[in-house]
Image (cartoon, rainbow, N blue to C red):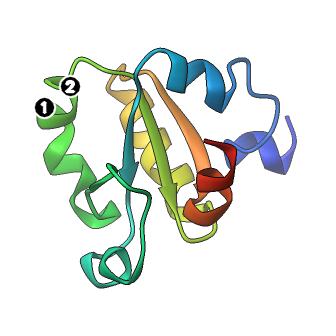
Amino acid sequence: MGLLDILGLGGKSESIQDFVSKGAVIIDVRTAGEFREGHIKGSKNIPLDTIQTKVNEIKNLNKSVIVCCRSGMRSAQAASVLKSHNIEVINGGGWQSLEGKL
C-alpha cells in the first residue's frame, strides 16, 4: 500500500463517476468560510472538525458520499471516519479538481 492509497487517492476500486451515477451526495469538509468562497453547486458543507458528530445525519441521507476539500488531505481524513462507520465513501480530493470531473 502506497502513500496515495493511505490518503484515499490511489487504487480506487470505484470511480467518481460510479459514485455520481449512484446519486452520491458531495460533502465539502472545508471550513464554512472556505466554502463560502467557492464550492461545487449542490454540495453540502460539513467541516472536518464536525464530521464525527454528523455521522448519523450523513447515514440518514441513504446515499453514497463523495468528500472533498481544498487539496484532498482533509477529505482523506473525513473518508476514513465515514468508512469506519460503514458509510460508502470515496475521497474526491480537491473540490476544484473534483468539479472538473463531474
Label 1 residue SS: helix
Q: Is residue 19 left or right of residue 15?
A: left
- Give the residue drawn at x 39%, y 70%: 30
Q: Is residue 77 left or right of residue 100?
A: left
Quarter of the image where the N terminus is located: top right
- Give the residue drawn at x 31%, y 21%: 63
* Residue bearing mark 1: 56
Relative to 35, does residue 55 appear above or below in the rendering?
above
Where on the picture, by quarter, is residue 46? bottom left
Residue 39 at x, y = what percent? Answer: 42, 66
Label 2 residue SS: helix
Gap between marks 1 and 2 measured at Cα: 5 Å
- Give the residue drawn at x 63%, y 68%: 71
Q: Nearer the viewer, residue 59 or 43?
A: 43
Query: Which amino acid type is shown beneath numbered disc 1?
Result: Asn
Q: Nearer the viewer, residue 78 or 45?
A: 45
Given contact means CB atoms under 8 Å apart, are the residues at marks 1 and 2 in contact? yes
Q: Nearer the viewer, residue 28 or 48?
A: 28
Residue 36 at x, y = what percent? Answer: 30, 79
- Give the residue drawn at x 87%, y 42%: 2
Residue 61 at x, y = what percent? Answer: 19, 26
Q: Which mark is residue 59?
A: 2
Q: Is residue 41 left or right of residue 51?
A: right
Query: Which amino acid type is shown beneath numbered disc 2?
Result: Lys
